[in-house]
Amino acid sequence: MEATIPHIATPKKANLSLKIDFDKKNDLQEIASRKNRSVHYLLVEAVQNYIAEQKEKAEYEKYVEERIMKAYNRLEKEGSNGVDSEQVLDVVMSRVQARLAK
């Protein structure tokens, strides 16, 4: 009886071309050499990190938008509690700046 090797599915990958100036390419080659990695590895890692950061940023922006709409709807329904818009703006901006500083 002949043994069969199970097929392991690997994710499909696409080629991507990148043109950069020679100085940046040389910098990447030096970094790759110091880290004992290939330039390809560094670029894949950079793309993955960028995508993760952008997804996190989009999620946070969605969260902020939902919070703002919830507060706006509550204000429309219940009315103001005497806080003027400048005070609200100051509080919101300080919280946004604190979040962005993290």
Image (tube, grey):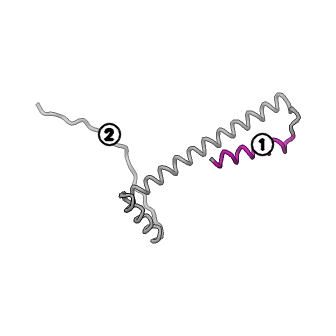
The span picked out in magenta is: 84-101
Instruction: Give the mark nearest the N terminus, 1 or 2.
Output: 2
Whole-number angstrom distance, CA of label 1 to CA of label 2: 51 Å
Q: Position of residue 8 (x, y in %)?
A: 29, 38
Find residue 67 and name its label. Answer: none
Q: Where is residue 42 in the image (x, y as percent from the top left)?
A: 42, 56
Q: Position of residue 18 (x, y in %)?
A: 45, 62
Q: Name the residue under label 1.
A: 91
Q: Residues within 10 Å of mark 1 (few under 14, many from 20)?
A: few
Q: Residues within 10 Å of mark 2 (few under 14, many from 20)?
A: few
Dot 2 falls on a residue whose secondary structure is loop
3 to the left or right of 65: left
Q: Which of marks 1 and 2 is in front?
A: 1
Q: Image point 60% across, 46% down: which residue?
A: 57
- The answer to the question of whether label 1 and label 2 lie on touching residues, with beta carbons closer than 8 A, is no
As drawn, the residue found furthest toward the top would be 78
Q: Where is residue 5 in the image (x, y as percent from the top left)?
A: 21, 36
Q: In this view, does 36 lie above or below 6?
A: below
Q: Image point 45% across, 71% down: which residue?
A: 22
Three-letter amino acid code of the residue under disc 1: Val
Q: Image point 39% across, 58% down: which residue?
A: 35
In this view of the protein, which residue sits in the foreground, 70 or 100? 100
Find residue 9 and name its label. Answer: 2
Q: Indicate yes or no whether the magenta region holds residue 95.
A: yes
Q: Is residue 6 above or below residue 17?
A: above
Three-letter amino acid code of the residue under disc 2: Ala
Q: Image point 44% across, 67% down: which residue?
A: 25
Q: Indicate yes or no whether the magenta region holds residue 100.
A: yes
As drawn, the residue found furthest toward the front would be 34
Magenta part, dominant SS: helix
Dot 1 falls on a residue whose secondary structure is helix
Residue 76 occupies which quadrant of the picture? top right
